[in-house]
């Protein structure tokens, strides 16, 4: 299962690389948000895989977080976490109001999402590296 956990983590890392390429483009803040969500989702699924858990077919970060809490302790900014969880679908498809109540994420929101995702990824990577 460690191999699959590493594969999930590599997929999360690839999303981080995409963010690094687009983070400075103010027109792509919604895509930074989307890839930040993906980093977190894939990191959580790596933890589940590492612990021989069945990977649910869901993008709901709250549900995934609840499933991994028995394996790791997370220090999470719930405000940012809840925002990232809510914008998975809306960041990919155009809507009348944008992906947040005020529209597309601001540049600062996008940076906050990226930093949050990077921190979660780093924590997951540490856990997986210690288990090898």
Image (tube, grey):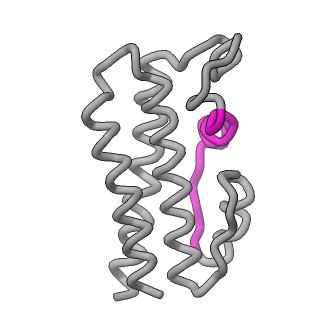
Residue lying furthest left: 21
Q: Position of residue 56 (x, y in %)?
A: 69, 68
In the rendered image, residue 63 lying in the magenta stretch gets the answer no
Q: Is residue 94 left or right of residue 21?
A: right
Identify the residue shown where x is 68% and y is 63%.
57
Q: Which residue corresponds to the image point at 48% horizontal and 35% vertical from the top-left?
A: 113
Q: Is residue 67 above or below residue 99?
A: below
Between 11 and 107, which is closer to the camera in this rendering? Answer: 11
Q: Which residues are magenta?
A: 72-89
Q: Is residue 41 above or below residue 107?
A: below
Instruction: State the count of labels.
Output: 0
* Viewer-proximal residue among 83 and 52: 52
Is 115 placed above or below 58 here? above
Is residue 76 one of those drawn in magenta? yes
Q: Position of residue 121 (x, y in %)?
A: 41, 57
Residue visible at 67% across and 61% down in the picture: 65
Quadrant housing the C terminus: bottom left
Q: Is residue 113 above or below residue 39?
A: above
Residue 88: x and y in percent read 62, 39
Res 66 quadrant in image: bottom right
- Residue 91: x %, y % from top left: 57, 29
Q: Is residue 116 left or right of residue 100?
A: left
């Amino acid at each position: 299962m460690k191999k699959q956990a590493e594969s999930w983590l590599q997929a999360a890392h690839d999303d981080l690389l995409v963010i690094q390429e687009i983070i400075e483009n103010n027109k792509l803040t919604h895509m930074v948000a989307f890839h930040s969500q993906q980093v977190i989702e894939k990191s959580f699924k790596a933890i589940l895989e590492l612990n021989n858990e069945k990977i649910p077919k869901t993008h709901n970060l709250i549900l995934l977080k609840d499933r991994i809490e028995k394996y790791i302790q997370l220090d999470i900014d719930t405000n940012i976490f809840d925002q990232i969880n809510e914008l998975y679908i809306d960041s990919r498809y155009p809507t009348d109001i944008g992906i947040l109540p005020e529209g597309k994420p601001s540049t600062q929101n996008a940076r906050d999402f990226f930093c949050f995702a990077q921190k979660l990824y780093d924590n997951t990577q540490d856990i997986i590296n210690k288990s090898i």
